[in-house]
Amino acid sequence: MSLSVTHSRSLTGLTAAAVDVEVHLANGLPSFTLVGLADTEVKESRERVRAALQSSGLEFPSNKRITVNLSPADLPKEGARFDLPIALGLLAASGQVDALRLPGFECAGELALSGELRPVRGALAMALSLRASGLPRELLLPRGSASEAALMNGLVVREAVHLLDIVQALQPNSEASLTRIQITAPTISADVPDLRDVKGQTGPKRALEVAAAGGLGLLLVGPPGTGKSMLARRLPGLLPPLDEPEALASAALLSVNGQFKPEHWGQRPFRSPHHSASAAALIGGGSPPRPGEITLAHHGVLFLDELPEFHRLALEALREPLETGTVHIARSCHQAEFPARFQLVAAMNPCPCGHLGHPTKVCHCTPEQVSRYQGRISGPLLDRIDLMVEVPMLPPRVLAAAAEGEATAEVAARVATARALALRRQGCVNAMLPSSQLDAHLQLTADAESMLHKAAARLAWSGRSYHRVLRIARTVADLCASEPVLATHVAESIQWRRALPGRA
Protein backbone atom coordinates (compact mmCIF):
# COMPACT_ATOMS: atom_id res chain seq x y z
CA MET A 1 0.00 0.00 0.00
CA SER A 2 1.32 3.46 -0.96
CA LEU A 3 0.02 6.96 -0.35
CA SER A 4 1.15 10.35 -1.71
CA VAL A 5 -0.16 13.91 -1.42
CA THR A 6 0.29 16.75 -3.89
CA HIS A 7 -1.02 20.30 -3.53
CA SER A 8 -3.09 22.31 -5.98
CA ARG A 9 -5.87 24.90 -6.00
CA SER A 10 -9.45 24.99 -7.25
CA LEU A 11 -11.03 28.14 -8.62
CA THR A 12 -14.08 29.10 -6.59
CA GLY A 13 -15.46 32.42 -7.74
CA LEU A 14 -12.46 34.74 -7.65
CA THR A 15 -10.47 32.78 -5.10
CA ALA A 16 -8.27 29.73 -5.53
CA ALA A 17 -8.99 27.43 -2.60
CA ALA A 18 -6.30 24.96 -1.54
CA VAL A 19 -6.86 21.35 -2.60
CA ASP A 20 -4.88 18.30 -1.48
CA VAL A 21 -4.69 15.58 -4.14
CA GLU A 22 -4.34 12.29 -2.27
CA VAL A 23 -3.39 9.21 -4.29
CA HIS A 24 -3.70 5.77 -2.74
CA LEU A 25 -2.46 2.52 -4.33
CA ALA A 26 -3.57 -0.82 -2.93
CA ASN A 27 -3.74 -4.45 -3.95
CA GLY A 28 -7.03 -5.73 -5.26
CA LEU A 29 -9.04 -5.65 -8.44
CA PRO A 30 -7.49 -3.08 -10.79
CA SER A 31 -9.56 0.12 -10.82
CA PHE A 32 -9.27 3.90 -10.90
CA THR A 33 -11.67 5.76 -8.59
CA LEU A 34 -11.77 9.57 -8.43
CA VAL A 35 -13.70 11.15 -5.51
CA GLY A 36 -14.07 14.64 -4.09
CA LEU A 37 -17.01 16.40 -5.81
CA ALA A 38 -15.29 16.45 -9.21
CA ASP A 39 -17.11 17.49 -12.35
CA THR A 40 -16.95 15.68 -15.69
CA GLU A 41 -13.77 17.42 -16.88
CA VAL A 42 -11.93 16.37 -13.72
CA LYS A 43 -13.16 12.78 -13.95
CA GLU A 44 -11.93 12.57 -17.53
CA SER A 45 -8.41 13.27 -16.27
CA ARG A 46 -7.93 9.53 -15.55
CA GLU A 47 -7.75 8.85 -19.30
CA ARG A 48 -5.51 11.83 -20.03
CA VAL A 49 -3.15 10.88 -17.18
CA ARG A 50 -3.04 7.24 -18.26
CA ALA A 51 -2.17 8.12 -21.87
CA ALA A 52 0.34 10.82 -20.85
CA LEU A 53 2.28 8.46 -18.56
CA GLN A 54 2.40 5.69 -21.12
CA SER A 55 3.38 8.06 -23.97
CA SER A 56 6.20 9.43 -21.81
CA GLY A 57 7.64 5.97 -21.12
CA LEU A 58 6.54 6.02 -17.49
CA GLU A 59 4.78 3.21 -15.67
CA PHE A 60 1.07 3.49 -15.03
CA PRO A 61 0.13 1.26 -12.03
CA SER A 62 -2.62 -0.51 -13.94
CA ASN A 63 -2.41 -3.62 -11.71
CA LYS A 64 -3.35 -1.64 -8.57
CA ARG A 65 -6.54 -0.39 -7.03
CA ILE A 66 -6.12 3.38 -7.46
CA THR A 67 -8.09 5.88 -5.37
CA VAL A 68 -7.66 9.62 -5.92
CA ASN A 69 -9.27 11.94 -3.38
CA LEU A 70 -9.56 15.70 -3.98
CA SER A 71 -9.78 17.21 -0.51
CA PRO A 72 -11.78 18.99 0.88
CA ALA A 73 -14.51 16.74 -0.44
CA ASP A 74 -17.30 19.34 -0.22
CA LEU A 75 -15.49 21.88 -2.46
CA PRO A 76 -16.56 21.71 -6.13
CA LYS A 77 -13.70 21.06 -8.58
CA GLU A 78 -13.83 21.75 -12.28
CA GLY A 79 -11.51 21.90 -15.28
CA ALA A 80 -8.46 19.97 -16.37
CA ARG A 81 -6.14 21.73 -13.92
CA PHE A 82 -5.81 18.61 -11.73
CA ASP A 83 -4.20 16.46 -14.46
CA LEU A 84 -0.68 17.38 -13.38
CA PRO A 85 -1.10 16.91 -9.59
CA ILE A 86 -2.88 13.57 -10.15
CA ALA A 87 -0.06 12.37 -12.46
CA LEU A 88 2.62 13.43 -9.98
CA GLY A 89 0.70 11.74 -7.15
CA LEU A 90 0.57 8.47 -9.09
CA LEU A 91 4.28 8.68 -9.88
CA ALA A 92 5.14 9.42 -6.23
CA ALA A 93 2.89 6.65 -4.87
CA SER A 94 4.47 4.14 -7.27
CA GLY A 95 8.02 5.27 -6.39
CA GLN A 96 8.93 6.83 -9.75
CA VAL A 97 9.66 10.28 -8.26
CA ASP A 98 10.81 11.44 -4.83
CA ALA A 99 7.60 11.86 -2.81
CA LEU A 100 9.42 13.91 -0.15
CA ARG A 101 9.92 16.79 -2.60
CA LEU A 102 6.27 17.16 -3.59
CA PRO A 103 5.06 19.04 -0.44
CA GLY A 104 7.21 22.02 -1.46
CA PHE A 105 5.15 22.63 -4.62
CA GLU A 106 1.67 23.69 -5.60
CA CYS A 107 0.93 22.70 -9.17
CA ALA A 108 -1.76 22.79 -11.83
CA GLY A 109 -1.81 21.95 -15.50
CA GLU A 110 -3.62 20.08 -18.23
CA LEU A 111 -1.88 17.07 -19.75
CA ALA A 112 -1.89 16.33 -23.45
CA LEU A 113 -1.92 12.66 -24.39
CA SER A 114 1.75 13.02 -25.36
CA GLY A 115 2.69 14.25 -21.89
CA GLU A 116 3.03 17.91 -22.85
CA LEU A 117 1.65 20.48 -20.43
CA ARG A 118 -1.03 22.94 -21.48
CA PRO A 119 -1.90 26.24 -19.76
CA VAL A 120 -4.85 26.57 -17.41
CA ARG A 121 -6.93 29.59 -16.52
CA GLY A 122 -6.65 31.32 -13.16
CA ALA A 123 -2.87 31.16 -12.74
CA LEU A 124 -2.72 34.68 -11.34
CA ALA A 125 -5.59 33.93 -8.95
CA MET A 126 -3.61 30.89 -7.74
CA ALA A 127 -0.57 33.09 -7.15
CA LEU A 128 -2.63 35.66 -5.22
CA SER A 129 -4.14 32.99 -2.98
CA LEU A 130 -0.80 31.28 -2.38
CA ARG A 131 0.87 34.54 -1.40
CA ALA A 132 -2.04 35.41 0.89
CA SER A 133 -1.79 32.02 2.61
CA GLY A 134 1.85 32.59 3.54
CA LEU A 135 2.76 28.94 2.85
CA PRO A 136 6.44 28.41 1.88
CA ARG A 137 5.67 26.63 -1.40
CA GLU A 138 6.77 27.10 -4.97
CA LEU A 139 4.26 27.33 -7.80
CA LEU A 140 4.73 24.83 -10.65
CA LEU A 141 2.80 25.62 -13.83
CA PRO A 142 2.88 25.02 -17.59
CA ARG A 143 4.50 27.51 -19.92
CA GLY A 144 2.16 30.45 -20.43
CA SER A 145 0.46 30.08 -17.09
CA ALA A 146 3.81 30.43 -15.29
CA SER A 147 4.63 33.77 -16.94
CA GLU A 148 1.21 35.04 -15.87
CA ALA A 149 1.67 33.95 -12.24
CA ALA A 150 5.19 35.43 -12.16
CA LEU A 151 3.65 38.92 -12.22
CA MET A 152 3.01 38.34 -8.52
CA ASN A 153 6.00 39.49 -6.46
CA GLY A 154 7.26 37.41 -3.55
CA LEU A 155 6.66 33.96 -5.06
CA VAL A 156 8.91 31.37 -6.66
CA VAL A 157 7.26 30.33 -9.92
CA ARG A 158 8.64 27.48 -12.02
CA GLU A 159 7.52 26.36 -15.45
CA ALA A 160 7.62 23.06 -17.29
CA VAL A 161 6.91 22.15 -20.89
CA HIS A 162 6.60 18.36 -20.56
CA LEU A 163 5.81 15.93 -17.77
CA LEU A 164 9.25 14.35 -18.20
CA ASP A 165 10.91 17.67 -17.27
CA ILE A 166 9.25 17.49 -13.87
CA VAL A 167 9.96 13.78 -13.41
CA GLN A 168 13.65 14.33 -14.09
CA ALA A 169 13.85 17.21 -11.59
CA LEU A 170 12.06 15.19 -8.87
CA GLN A 171 14.34 12.16 -8.98
CA PRO A 172 16.26 11.43 -5.76
CA ASN A 173 19.62 13.26 -5.73
CA SER A 174 18.84 14.78 -9.13
CA GLU A 175 20.78 17.93 -10.05
CA ALA A 176 18.26 18.90 -12.69
CA SER A 177 16.04 21.87 -11.83
CA LEU A 178 12.91 23.38 -13.24
CA THR A 179 13.13 26.76 -14.91
CA ARG A 180 12.33 29.63 -12.57
CA ILE A 181 10.33 32.44 -14.18
CA GLN A 182 11.19 35.98 -13.13
CA ILE A 183 9.64 38.79 -15.10
CA THR A 184 8.92 42.43 -14.47
CA ALA A 185 5.54 43.99 -15.07
CA PRO A 186 5.11 44.69 -18.79
CA THR A 187 5.32 48.25 -20.02
CA ILE A 188 1.89 49.82 -20.15
CA SER A 189 0.83 50.26 -23.76
CA ALA A 190 -0.22 53.77 -24.79
CA ASP A 191 -2.03 52.61 -27.92
CA VAL A 192 -5.46 54.12 -27.23
CA PRO A 193 -7.89 55.96 -29.53
CA ASP A 194 -7.23 59.70 -29.57
CA LEU A 195 -9.92 62.17 -28.55
CA ARG A 196 -8.64 64.43 -31.30
CA ASP A 197 -10.36 62.16 -33.83
CA VAL A 198 -13.79 63.37 -32.63
CA LYS A 199 -14.64 66.51 -34.59
CA GLY A 200 -16.81 69.15 -32.94
CA GLN A 201 -19.01 67.92 -30.07
CA THR A 202 -17.45 70.32 -27.57
CA GLY A 203 -20.16 69.74 -24.96
CA PRO A 204 -20.03 65.93 -24.99
CA LYS A 205 -16.23 66.00 -24.88
CA ARG A 206 -16.40 68.26 -21.82
CA ALA A 207 -18.84 65.83 -20.22
CA LEU A 208 -16.44 62.98 -20.97
CA GLU A 209 -13.66 64.89 -19.20
CA VAL A 210 -15.87 65.51 -16.15
CA ALA A 211 -16.88 61.85 -16.06
CA ALA A 212 -13.23 60.74 -16.22
CA ALA A 213 -12.14 63.16 -13.50
CA GLY A 214 -14.83 62.09 -11.07
CA GLY A 215 -15.26 58.42 -12.00
CA LEU A 216 -18.87 59.24 -12.87
CA GLY A 217 -21.41 57.36 -14.99
CA LEU A 218 -22.34 58.81 -18.37
CA LEU A 219 -25.27 58.41 -20.77
CA LEU A 220 -24.84 59.69 -24.35
CA VAL A 221 -28.07 60.35 -26.26
CA GLY A 222 -28.23 61.30 -29.92
CA PRO A 223 -29.10 60.25 -33.48
CA PRO A 224 -27.07 57.53 -35.21
CA GLY A 225 -23.65 58.57 -36.46
CA THR A 226 -23.06 61.49 -34.11
CA GLY A 227 -19.97 59.95 -32.47
CA LYS A 228 -21.43 58.41 -29.29
CA SER A 229 -19.41 55.19 -29.59
CA MET A 230 -16.27 57.12 -30.57
CA LEU A 231 -16.56 59.21 -27.42
CA ALA A 232 -17.17 56.20 -25.19
CA ARG A 233 -14.18 54.27 -26.55
CA ARG A 234 -11.90 57.19 -25.75
CA LEU A 235 -12.77 57.29 -22.05
CA PRO A 236 -10.18 54.67 -20.94
CA GLY A 237 -7.42 56.80 -22.48
CA LEU A 238 -8.42 59.71 -20.23
CA LEU A 239 -8.18 57.62 -17.06
CA PRO A 240 -4.85 57.19 -15.22
CA PRO A 241 -3.13 53.79 -15.43
CA LEU A 242 -3.98 51.27 -12.75
CA ASP A 243 -1.71 51.15 -9.71
CA GLU A 244 -0.20 47.78 -8.79
CA PRO A 245 -2.97 46.52 -6.45
CA GLU A 246 -5.65 47.55 -8.98
CA ALA A 247 -3.71 46.02 -11.87
CA LEU A 248 -3.31 42.73 -9.98
CA ALA A 249 -7.01 42.65 -9.07
CA SER A 250 -8.07 43.36 -12.65
CA ALA A 251 -5.62 40.85 -14.12
CA ALA A 252 -6.71 38.15 -11.64
CA LEU A 253 -10.36 38.62 -12.61
CA LEU A 254 -9.55 38.29 -16.29
CA SER A 255 -7.29 35.33 -15.53
CA VAL A 256 -10.16 33.46 -13.88
CA ASN A 257 -12.06 33.73 -17.16
CA GLY A 258 -8.97 32.91 -19.22
CA GLN A 259 -8.94 36.37 -20.85
CA PHE A 260 -5.84 38.00 -19.37
CA LYS A 261 -3.23 39.26 -21.83
CA PRO A 262 0.15 40.43 -20.48
CA GLU A 263 0.32 43.23 -23.05
CA HIS A 264 -2.78 44.76 -21.42
CA TRP A 265 -1.16 44.91 -17.98
CA GLY A 266 -1.98 48.15 -16.15
CA GLN A 267 -4.63 49.25 -18.64
CA ARG A 268 -8.15 50.06 -17.58
CA PRO A 269 -10.46 47.26 -18.76
CA PHE A 270 -12.99 48.24 -21.42
CA ARG A 271 -15.88 45.82 -21.73
CA SER A 272 -18.50 46.27 -24.43
CA PRO A 273 -21.03 43.39 -24.37
CA HIS A 274 -23.56 43.07 -27.20
CA HIS A 275 -27.08 44.23 -26.40
CA SER A 276 -28.31 40.63 -26.63
CA ALA A 277 -26.37 39.77 -23.44
CA SER A 278 -28.43 38.13 -20.72
CA ALA A 279 -28.60 39.19 -17.09
CA ALA A 280 -26.28 36.30 -16.15
CA ALA A 281 -23.74 37.43 -18.77
CA LEU A 282 -23.72 40.95 -17.34
CA ILE A 283 -23.94 40.19 -13.63
CA GLY A 284 -22.45 36.71 -13.47
CA GLY A 285 -23.98 33.35 -12.77
CA GLY A 286 -23.71 29.63 -13.28
CA SER A 287 -23.05 26.89 -10.79
CA PRO A 288 -20.56 27.44 -9.36
CA PRO A 289 -20.98 31.19 -10.03
CA ARG A 290 -18.62 32.88 -12.46
CA PRO A 291 -18.04 36.61 -12.87
CA GLY A 292 -19.96 38.58 -15.48
CA GLU A 293 -19.11 41.63 -17.56
CA ILE A 294 -19.51 44.10 -14.72
CA THR A 295 -16.91 42.22 -12.68
CA LEU A 296 -14.53 41.90 -15.64
CA ALA A 297 -14.87 45.71 -15.97
CA HIS A 298 -13.73 46.18 -12.33
CA HIS A 299 -11.54 49.32 -12.10
CA GLY A 300 -12.40 50.03 -15.73
CA VAL A 301 -15.20 50.99 -18.11
CA LEU A 302 -18.39 49.12 -19.00
CA PHE A 303 -19.83 50.41 -22.29
CA LEU A 304 -23.45 49.53 -23.07
CA ASP A 305 -24.23 50.61 -26.62
CA GLU A 306 -27.88 50.69 -27.74
CA LEU A 307 -28.93 50.75 -24.10
CA PRO A 308 -32.72 50.36 -24.61
CA GLU A 309 -32.11 47.20 -26.67
CA PHE A 310 -30.74 45.30 -23.65
CA HIS A 311 -33.10 42.95 -21.85
CA ARG A 312 -35.03 44.73 -19.13
CA LEU A 313 -33.96 42.22 -16.46
CA ALA A 314 -30.31 42.66 -17.44
CA LEU A 315 -30.50 46.45 -17.07
CA GLU A 316 -32.39 46.33 -13.79
CA ALA A 317 -29.76 43.98 -12.37
CA LEU A 318 -27.23 46.81 -12.70
CA ARG A 319 -28.94 48.95 -10.09
CA GLU A 320 -27.43 47.47 -6.92
CA PRO A 321 -23.86 47.07 -8.27
CA LEU A 322 -23.87 50.71 -9.41
CA GLU A 323 -24.53 51.74 -5.82
CA THR A 324 -22.46 49.22 -3.85
CA GLY A 325 -19.60 48.29 -6.17
CA THR A 326 -20.19 44.59 -5.52
CA VAL A 327 -22.55 41.89 -6.77
CA HIS A 328 -23.73 38.99 -4.64
CA ILE A 329 -24.83 35.89 -6.54
CA ALA A 330 -26.79 33.27 -4.63
CA ARG A 331 -27.55 29.79 -5.89
CA SER A 332 -29.03 26.82 -4.06
CA CYS A 333 -25.61 25.24 -3.49
CA HIS A 334 -23.19 28.13 -3.99
CA GLN A 335 -22.87 31.78 -3.09
CA ALA A 336 -20.28 34.24 -4.36
CA GLU A 337 -19.56 37.94 -4.01
CA PHE A 338 -17.70 39.62 -6.87
CA PRO A 339 -16.25 43.15 -7.02
CA ALA A 340 -17.91 45.44 -9.56
CA ARG A 341 -16.48 48.93 -9.13
CA PHE A 342 -16.83 49.93 -12.77
CA GLN A 343 -17.54 53.18 -14.60
CA LEU A 344 -20.70 52.93 -16.70
CA VAL A 345 -20.89 54.60 -20.12
CA ALA A 346 -24.05 54.03 -22.13
CA ALA A 347 -25.27 55.24 -25.51
CA MET A 348 -28.74 55.31 -27.04
CA ASN A 349 -30.85 56.86 -29.77
CA PRO A 350 -33.56 59.32 -28.66
CA CYS A 351 -36.34 57.33 -30.36
CA PRO A 352 -36.88 54.08 -32.32
CA CYS A 353 -36.04 55.67 -35.70
CA GLY A 354 -33.22 57.70 -34.17
CA HIS A 355 -34.15 61.05 -35.76
CA LEU A 356 -35.86 62.82 -32.87
CA GLY A 357 -34.23 66.24 -32.71
CA HIS A 358 -32.38 65.73 -36.02
CA PRO A 359 -31.87 69.09 -37.81
CA THR A 360 -32.76 67.80 -41.29
CA LYS A 361 -34.46 64.39 -41.02
CA VAL A 362 -38.03 64.04 -39.84
CA CYS A 363 -38.89 61.75 -36.95
CA HIS A 364 -42.01 59.70 -37.74
CA CYS A 365 -42.29 58.15 -34.29
CA THR A 366 -45.45 58.91 -32.33
CA PRO A 367 -45.17 60.26 -28.79
CA GLU A 368 -46.34 56.87 -27.53
CA GLN A 369 -43.58 55.08 -29.46
CA VAL A 370 -40.96 57.49 -28.12
CA SER A 371 -42.27 57.08 -24.58
CA ARG A 372 -42.34 53.29 -24.88
CA TYR A 373 -38.80 53.21 -26.31
CA GLN A 374 -37.30 55.44 -23.63
CA GLY A 375 -39.38 53.66 -20.98
CA ARG A 376 -37.27 50.56 -21.51
CA ILE A 377 -34.79 52.34 -19.25
CA SER A 378 -36.43 52.62 -15.86
CA GLY A 379 -36.40 55.74 -13.76
CA PRO A 380 -34.43 54.09 -10.91
CA LEU A 381 -31.67 53.13 -13.35
CA LEU A 382 -31.55 56.61 -14.91
CA ASP A 383 -31.39 58.04 -11.41
CA ARG A 384 -28.13 56.15 -10.86
CA ILE A 385 -26.41 57.57 -13.97
CA ASP A 386 -24.60 60.80 -13.14
CA LEU A 387 -24.36 62.68 -16.44
CA MET A 388 -26.94 62.60 -19.24
CA VAL A 389 -25.55 64.26 -22.35
CA GLU A 390 -27.13 65.01 -25.69
CA VAL A 391 -24.84 64.38 -28.66
CA PRO A 392 -26.33 66.47 -31.52
CA MET A 393 -26.10 65.79 -35.23
CA LEU A 394 -23.65 68.25 -36.83
CA PRO A 395 -24.05 69.19 -40.51
CA PRO A 396 -21.16 68.14 -42.78
CA ARG A 397 -20.11 71.75 -43.37
CA VAL A 398 -19.81 72.30 -39.61
CA LEU A 399 -17.74 69.13 -39.21
CA ALA A 400 -15.47 70.12 -42.08
CA ALA A 401 -14.89 73.57 -40.59
CA ALA A 402 -14.39 72.29 -37.02
CA ALA A 403 -10.97 73.01 -35.59
CA GLU A 404 -8.83 70.12 -34.41
CA GLY A 405 -9.64 69.39 -30.80
CA GLU A 406 -7.41 68.56 -27.87
CA ALA A 407 -5.46 65.32 -27.86
CA THR A 408 -6.20 62.60 -25.33
CA ALA A 409 -2.88 63.26 -23.55
CA GLU A 410 -3.78 66.90 -22.87
CA VAL A 411 -7.20 66.09 -21.41
CA ALA A 412 -5.77 63.13 -19.47
CA ALA A 413 -3.29 65.46 -17.78
CA ARG A 414 -6.12 67.66 -16.47
CA VAL A 415 -8.05 64.58 -15.38
CA ALA A 416 -5.01 63.27 -13.47
CA THR A 417 -4.58 66.63 -11.70
CA ALA A 418 -8.25 66.74 -10.68
CA ARG A 419 -8.16 63.15 -9.44
CA ALA A 420 -5.03 63.89 -7.43
CA LEU A 421 -6.82 66.81 -5.72
CA ALA A 422 -9.73 64.55 -4.79
CA LEU A 423 -7.45 61.81 -3.48
CA ARG A 424 -5.49 64.26 -1.29
CA ARG A 425 -8.70 65.76 0.06
CA GLN A 426 -10.83 62.68 0.72
CA GLY A 427 -8.84 59.57 -0.24
CA CYS A 428 -11.10 58.52 -3.14
CA VAL A 429 -12.53 59.80 -6.40
CA ASN A 430 -15.70 61.84 -6.15
CA ALA A 431 -17.95 59.05 -7.44
CA MET A 432 -16.99 56.90 -4.43
CA LEU A 433 -17.38 59.67 -1.86
CA PRO A 434 -20.06 58.53 0.66
CA SER A 435 -23.11 60.76 1.00
CA SER A 436 -22.34 61.22 4.68
CA GLN A 437 -19.04 62.92 3.78
CA LEU A 438 -20.29 65.16 0.98
CA ASP A 439 -20.94 68.19 3.18
CA ALA A 440 -17.49 67.96 4.73
CA HIS A 441 -15.70 68.15 1.37
CA LEU A 442 -18.02 70.29 -0.79
CA GLN A 443 -17.43 73.81 0.58
CA LEU A 444 -20.43 75.25 -1.29
CA THR A 445 -20.63 79.05 -1.46
CA ALA A 446 -23.92 80.70 -0.50
CA ASP A 447 -24.76 81.50 -4.13
CA ALA A 448 -24.01 77.93 -5.22
CA GLU A 449 -26.15 76.45 -2.44
CA SER A 450 -29.07 78.75 -3.27
CA MET A 451 -28.92 77.84 -6.97
CA LEU A 452 -28.72 74.14 -6.16
CA HIS A 453 -31.77 74.21 -3.87
CA LYS A 454 -33.86 76.10 -6.43
CA ALA A 455 -32.93 73.62 -9.17
CA ALA A 456 -33.67 70.63 -6.94
CA ALA A 457 -37.14 71.97 -6.11
CA ARG A 458 -37.97 72.93 -9.70
CA LEU A 459 -36.73 69.69 -11.29
CA ALA A 460 -38.09 67.47 -8.49
CA TRP A 461 -34.81 65.64 -7.93
CA SER A 462 -34.68 62.61 -5.71
CA GLY A 463 -32.19 62.50 -2.88
CA ARG A 464 -29.94 60.33 -5.01
CA SER A 465 -30.05 62.81 -7.93
CA TYR A 466 -29.29 65.66 -5.55
CA HIS A 467 -26.20 63.91 -4.21
CA ARG A 468 -25.03 63.04 -7.72
CA VAL A 469 -25.22 66.69 -8.76
CA LEU A 470 -23.12 67.54 -5.72
CA ARG A 471 -20.47 65.03 -6.85
CA ILE A 472 -20.52 66.47 -10.38
CA ALA A 473 -20.14 70.01 -9.01
CA ARG A 474 -17.23 68.93 -6.81
CA THR A 475 -15.57 67.37 -9.87
CA VAL A 476 -16.07 70.50 -12.00
CA ALA A 477 -14.49 72.55 -9.22
CA ASP A 478 -11.53 70.16 -9.07
CA LEU A 479 -10.98 70.54 -12.82
CA CYS A 480 -10.89 74.30 -12.24
CA ALA A 481 -8.49 73.81 -9.29
CA SER A 482 -11.02 75.57 -7.05
CA GLU A 483 -11.27 74.61 -3.38
CA PRO A 484 -14.82 76.00 -2.87
CA VAL A 485 -17.65 74.95 -5.18
CA LEU A 486 -18.91 78.11 -6.90
CA ALA A 487 -22.24 78.90 -8.53
CA THR A 488 -20.69 78.49 -11.99
CA HIS A 489 -19.66 74.94 -11.10
CA VAL A 490 -23.17 74.14 -9.91
CA ALA A 491 -24.71 75.68 -13.05
CA GLU A 492 -22.59 73.42 -15.27
CA SER A 493 -23.49 70.40 -13.15
CA ILE A 494 -27.22 71.04 -13.40
CA GLN A 495 -27.15 70.92 -17.19
CA TRP A 496 -25.70 67.39 -17.07
CA ARG A 497 -28.86 66.13 -15.29
CA ARG A 498 -31.32 67.07 -18.03
CA ALA A 499 -34.08 64.62 -18.92
CA LEU A 500 -34.01 62.64 -22.15
CA PRO A 501 -35.41 64.39 -25.26
CA GLY A 502 -39.17 63.95 -25.32
CA ARG A 503 -39.22 62.62 -21.75
CA ALA A 504 -40.54 64.61 -18.86
Image (spheres, rainbow, N blue to C red):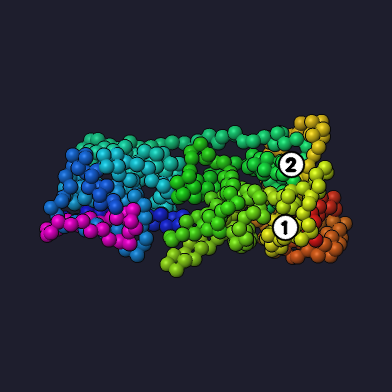
**In the picture provided, is 230 more to the left or to the right than 447?**
left
Few, some or many C-alpha atoms within 10 Å of disc 1 (few <14, some 14-19, many ≥20)?
many
Where residue 12 appears, x then y in whole percent?
A: 42, 57
Where residue 114 appears, x then y in whole percent?
A: 26, 39
Q: Residue at x 59, y 45 (%)?
A: 270
In terms of secondary structure, where does tag 1 sit?
helix
Let me know if residue 67 is in the magenta part.
no
Q: Which residue is under mark 1?
A: 374
Residue 89 - label: none
Few, some or many C-alpha atoms within 10 Å of disc 2 (few <14, some 14-19, many ≥20)?
some
Name the kind of residue labelled 2 in the image.
Thr
Above-or-below relation of 370 to 399 = below
Q: Which mark is first along the chain, 1 or 2?
A: 2
In terms of secondary structure, where does tag 2 sit?
loop
Toward which corner of the image does residue 497 lie, by quadrant?
Answer: bottom right
Disc 2/disc 1 C-alpha distance (Å): 19 Å
Name the kind of residue labelled 1 in the image.
Gln
Where residue 279 appears, x then y in whole percent?
A: 56, 59
Toward which corner of the image does residue 199 lie, by quadrant?
Answer: top right
Quadrant placement of the N terminus: bottom left
Q: Residue at x 74, y 65 (%)?
A: 463
Let me know if residue 23 is in the magenta part.
yes
What span is in magenta? 20-43
Where residue 402 appears, x then y in whole percent?
A: 80, 32
Q: Residue at x 27, y 47 (%)?
A: 48
Q: Which residue is under mark 2?
A: 226
**In the picture provided, is 345 more to the left or to the right than 396?**
left
